[in-house]
Amino acid sequence: MSRLFTAEIGGILAGATQRSAGEGEAGEAATCHIGIESRLLRIEASGEWRIAHLDPVDRRLRALTADSIAAHQAIIDLSGISRFDTAAATILNRTARLLEEKGIRVSFEGVSDSWQTLLDKIGEFGAPAPAYTHKHPLYLEIIGRIGETTRAIGEEVTGMLGFIGSVLTGAAQTALSPRRFRWVPFVHHMEKSGFDALPLVCLLTFLIGAVVAQQGAVQLRTFGAEVFTVNLIAIVFLREVGLLLTAIIVAGRSGSAFTAEIGSMKMREELDAMRTLGLDPMDMLILPRVAALTITLPLLTFIADIMGLLGGGVVVYFMLDMSPGVYLARVQEAVDFWTIAVGLIKAPFMASIIALVGCRAGLSVTGSAESVGAMTTRSVVRSIFLVIILDALFAMFFTAVGV
Amino acid sequence: MAKKGEPIIEVEGIDTRFGDHVIHENLNLTVRRGEVIGIVGGSGTGKSVLLRTILGLKKPDAGRVRVFGIDFSTLPEEERRLHEQRWGVLFQDGALFSALTVAENIQVPYREHLNLSQELMDELAAMKISMVGLRATAGDLYPSELSGGMRKRAGLARALALDPEILFLDEPTAGLDPIGAAAFDELINDLKETMGLTVFLVTHDLDTLYATCDRIAVLAEKHVILIGTIEDMMRSDHPWIHEYFHGPRARAAFSGK
């Protein structure tokens, strides 16, 4: 994950305009003159030896020290230099060190006191450690990744089951001693993830209801069966779409909020602080959220169903000239108790899945701000995935029991 | 080259308010090139706000700030960025980019502003890492894998990447162990000596004040009430300054010198 981010930022940096080497004030470039005379190597440095100007000089000196040199003594003359910084000291120290490794005696000339201190200081650090690179052949990387992912999935499944278990235990304990239940956060989260989601849920389901009705009417008209548009809307919405849409909206809105809230608290050690104060994060944070969502999602689904039917009704009224009274009568004909019950029975299960996934992702946040973002993304993706899987399982179940 | 002792940071008549809450009122401060100046003051007196104002991260409600003799707020974007390379800042918790390793963090200014070979950047990053007293292996670690003290050092290494003329330090020794803090003080002195660095130091650490600062500015009552050497501070009879520099911890720090 973080490697990916690195590549991203690296890309941004590489894309940034390369400004000319200057630091706000015009300066003369750094130069060095290299000459060998009767086995004496002279390196005469001049100009502004500051990091902004040093790249060409560095390349020359690297090239020099990479080859064998026919000299047994070297003098590095700094008297022509007007500015000097740590980068210059690093380069000169390295050059001197490499020359000495070749058996050449090196001495400096024209070094002022403060530059000497800098050279000595930098020299104390010695040769830099070779950069640590971990490269494997591609096929190993691929196999490694597959193995890593499989292991992570297995761990995630057991972790999630363990988490569900501990939430159930917490819920059971709360049921035995109801005074432990935190009503204030419970109501707060009902408002935030339920009531505040109403406008968005209403608008979207109204629009989807209208779109389904319009598309259905166009198709069914070719068979002369456009009156069945009403059956289409009523059954599709009450059984599936109303709930699925609401669950997905809530997963995006509240599941992510749960992860981000709990995650940033975890990051700032607030959860640890709670534990040391004798408060259980399960009671304080997780149970109220799970309970609130489990109660509000069915309610939201019910409202979503009504809005979907309303959207369909509006389209039917304009496209098929069907009066609201007839529309309602046809809806009643098309729908029985179980049509709406099938939709609403599923809602609390989906709500708990969304809340559990959101809370658990929040608890898995590690120290960095980056991991809050990664976990939030993961929580939304995972809860939408599980909501759809669960819906498919329920469809199989209801078909089997014949409703 | 600019001479030692000339004003390098000039803060003139700064007012800062958050809503009705006045932080600074007609605050004046001049920092001279080559000195280490320590900013002290009680909690909530706006030390960090002053730092952010000088850096241009917060716009003052009145007055003006000049750094290197330039009023940054009047400069066009491009020019301001060039001048911003002349200072380095260490934020309280290091403020390292969490998606980059320590070495990559240090190389950010090189990549952004200069055109250097990767070998040279790696070498310079390794040099800065050992300069601030981190182990060489720290370069490959991500900030989340570092302790608080190590993050601070890594942040300092990044601040020093371009050999700045001014170094701004926000509580550099807070959270360090005494040995680490002493090493930090020594490092600041070394940098000042070798590179002619000007250091603007916000601190609560009395040992750091004694060990490094040429002058100290005391923030209280919404402005700088006193600026001067440690001796000036000791002589002052302002109640807060007296309390600060004659308290039990101050005596311990001073006698240890």
Image: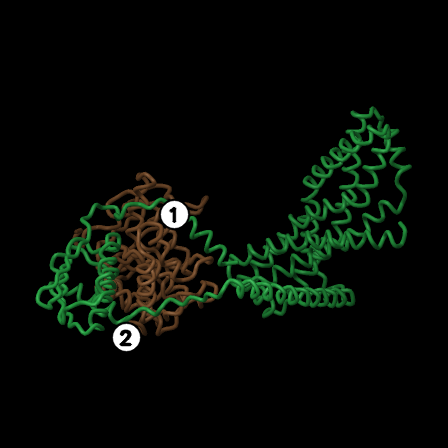
Chain colours: A green, B brown
The amino acid marked with disc number 1 is: Leu
Q: x and y percent of residue B171 in the render?
A: 37, 61
Rendered image: mark on residue A252: none
Residue B220 percent coordinates (x, y): 35, 55
Q: Quadrant of the C terminus of chain B?
A: bottom left
- Mark 1 Cα-neighbour bin, 10 Å: few <14, some 14–19, many ≥20: few
Dividing the picture into quadrants, the one containing residue A221 is: top right
Task: Give the residue number, with chain letter if any, for mark 1.
Answer: B57
Q: Is disc 1 placed on a helix, strand or loop?
A: loop
Left or right of residue B145, residue A236 in this image: right
What's the CA distance linking mark 2 and mark 1? 39 Å
Contact between marks 2 and 1 (CB within 8 A): the answer is no
Query: Looking at the image, can residue B39 be seen?
Result: no
- Per the image, label 2 sits on a secondary structure element best described as helix
Q: Position of residue A379 (x, y in %)?
A: 63, 55
What residue is shown at x 74% (from left), y 50% (from top)? A296
Among the 4 quarters of the image, the one containing residue A332: top right
Total marks in image:
2
Image position of A9 with respect to B61: above or below: below
Task: Give the residue pinned by disc 2.
Answer: B255
* Image vertical order of residue B256 relative to residue A172, above or below: below
Q: Residue at x 68, y 46 (%)?
A: A249
Q: Is residue A141 above or below residue A83?
A: below
A298 on left or right of A34: right
